[in-house]
Image (tube, helix red, strand yellow):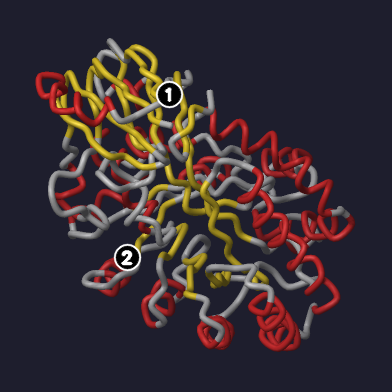
Amino acid sequence: MAILIHNIKELVNIENGENRIWAAGKEMEKLLSIQDAFLLIEDELIIDFGSMKDIGRLEEKLDTISMLTEIDAKDRMVFPSFCDSHTHLVYAGSREIEYVDKIRGLSYEEIAKRGGGILNSAKRLQEASEEQLIEEALPRIEEIIQYGTGAVEIKSGYGLTPEAEIKMLRVARKLGEITPLTIKTTFLGAHAVPLEYKGRQNEYVDLVINDMIPQIAAEDLADYIDVFCDKGFFTVEETERILMAGIKYGLRPKIHANELAYSGGIQVGVKYGALSVDHLEYTGDDEIEVLLGTETMPTILPGAAFFLNMVHAPARKMIDAGLPVAFASDFNPGSSPSGNMQLVLSMACIQFRLTPQEAINATTLNTAYAMGLSDELGSIAIGKKANVYISREMPSIEFLPYAYGSNKVDVVILNGVIIQ
């Protein structure tokens, strides 16, 4: 099966020649595109693209294709699908009552100390079946696909027992089998300390290391390992122990870092070769210096900062210093109950002062890197997976983050198949 999209107003974020693994610093402003373009997809992959004036070169190729779907994209643009490199998409129930507590002035830490927050979600998840979790997750997946997302990372961390953490990761793996999304999974047993381990945090860390990690590795349920290294959660020393255990089993680190304080999470992430360090509200000159020249992707989660009314990570300063930056949704029931990456893109521009070009790179190519997928997703390149969307009629690229309240996606193509 093949799809030919022609008369594309603008084909956005293409690769010419050597494919980039990410965009950093001034390179984030560069967004290559072709006006009046075509895109040819076959067997899940992008096999050709170019200017409409050169479409004649496809004639011989098209003669060999028995099943061809043609789409006239006049006045519409084609973009690579969003990659959402940080979500907690598998969870049971919502936490809107805590949202009201936040309105009334309670802090994230205060709610957590009362048994709310992550512990609230953990209790619900422990009681839910795999079937229930899949049933609740599917509408969320359908929604984010409609908004242009083609790949997500899904973390555990709402189980906090060996059985419940394994259950979460099994569900995430299953979602990757039954939905068109490309899904990566991350073990986040060290998301919070269960109430029964209050005052015995080291024992819970031992449980994560000695029980959870070996079981999860035995079933090959996770691609990565994560720790919430921050004030009131896990210390640098505890984080190091957990990461070393995960690395022993082939799990590369991804870190929740510096959301609540200058926690040392960025430094420990870089030390252990983390693929990404995420949140980063508290990032200063020392942290930026540590990140420069590494293979770790700084990842900002604007939905959480917005929902919790927190300080903003210094994205502009990081880019100006030469770093790459990714923006993801942090889709979860407590601090960012939205997986709308179009909104994330708009927040990157409006609240964090990225240009639209930088923001598109930050939500496609750079988030693909933060999932270990930049060789197959995140931009329009020959040989990459055909995860793209066709926009509604738009006057310019800048309209995508500008019109923050509407869905600009018209047609979704994932794995070379038209989804909607």
SS under mark 2: loop
The x and y percentages for residue 184 are 53, 58
Q: Quadrant of residue 6?
A: top left
| Amino acid, disc 2 | Gly
Q: Residue 7: which quarter of the image?
A: top left
Amino acid type, label 1? Tyr
Identify the disc placed on residue 284.
2
- Position of residue 185 relative to residue 336, above or below, is below
Q: Is residue 218 left or right of residue 411?
A: right
- From the image, which quarter does the N terminus lie in? top left
Question: SS for tag 1?
Answer: loop
Q: Position of residue 71 (x, y in %)?
A: 36, 16
Which residue is label 1 attached to? 404
Q: Are marks 2 and 1 in contact (CB under 8 Å)?
A: no
Q: Which residue is pictured at 16% across the width and 30% down the height?
A: 50
Q: Residue at x 31, y 39 (%)?
A: 46
Label 2 or label 1, whichever lies nearer to me, is 1
